Amino acid sequence: MDLSAHVHVPYCGGAKPTPEMEKGRLDPMDTVFVTKSLRKKQKTIQVPLDINGCAHIKLRKGNYSLFHKHKLLSIKEFNKLYRPENNKWYTYKGDSCLYKYLSNPDAVFEVSKQKIIKVVVKSRCYTGINPCIDYSGPLRP
């Protein structure tokens, strides 16, 4: 199975973008985790991706969930990396929001039918991949 995983980064600049810039860009992920539920337990494997965010992996038939590597961090570790400290322009929606986000897979797929899996995680201007932060500050002109 061929897997590709990227983060979509929107155009956040102030100048009028070209049509190409307006589409944003896809940054390749370097690692994802794939989980398969087995009766009463789960099996999780780490999948390193190449410089283009791609990998060829072999999985047995079944249903799988895919998580960006940051979703295996604790709430404290995630906040340390992806939450601005004490900034008046950012509002944190709380640990319950973040717990829900970290618990949900970025993709769910079945091995048997699909031979190619493409995953794109969306980020936002000013807050990146953290959906539990709102930005209310000035926008770029």
Image (cartoon, rainbow, N blue to C red):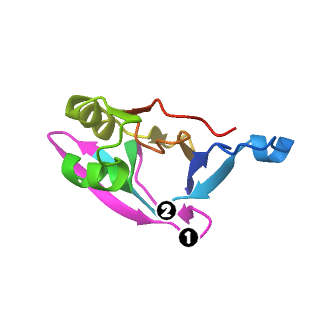
Residue 75 in the image: x percent, y percent?
A: 22, 46
What is the quadrant of the C terminus in the image? Answer: top right
Residue 87: name its quadrant: top left
Residue 116 visible in this rendered orientation of the protein: no
Answer whether residue 44 is magenta in the image. Answer: yes
**Residue at the extreme right:** 18
| Image quadrant where residue 17 sits | top right
**Location of residue 32 in the rendering, given as x and y in whole percent from the top left corner:** 41, 57
The quadrant in which the N terminus is found is bottom right
Instruction: Give left or right: position of 18 versus 104.
Output: right
Counting from the top left corner in percent of width and height, residue 55 is at: 54, 64
Q: Residues within 10 Å of mark 1 (few under 14, many from 20)?
A: some
Residue farthest toward the bottom in the current orientation of the protein? 51
Residue at 34% x, 47% y: name it: 83
- Dot 2 or dot 1: first in sequence order is 1
Q: Which residue is mark 2?
A: 57
Q: Nearer the viewer, residue 54 or 99?
A: 99
| Three-letter amino acid code of the residue under disc 1 | Asp
Query: To which residue does mark 1 refer?
Result: 50
The stretch of residues the image draws in magenta is 37-62
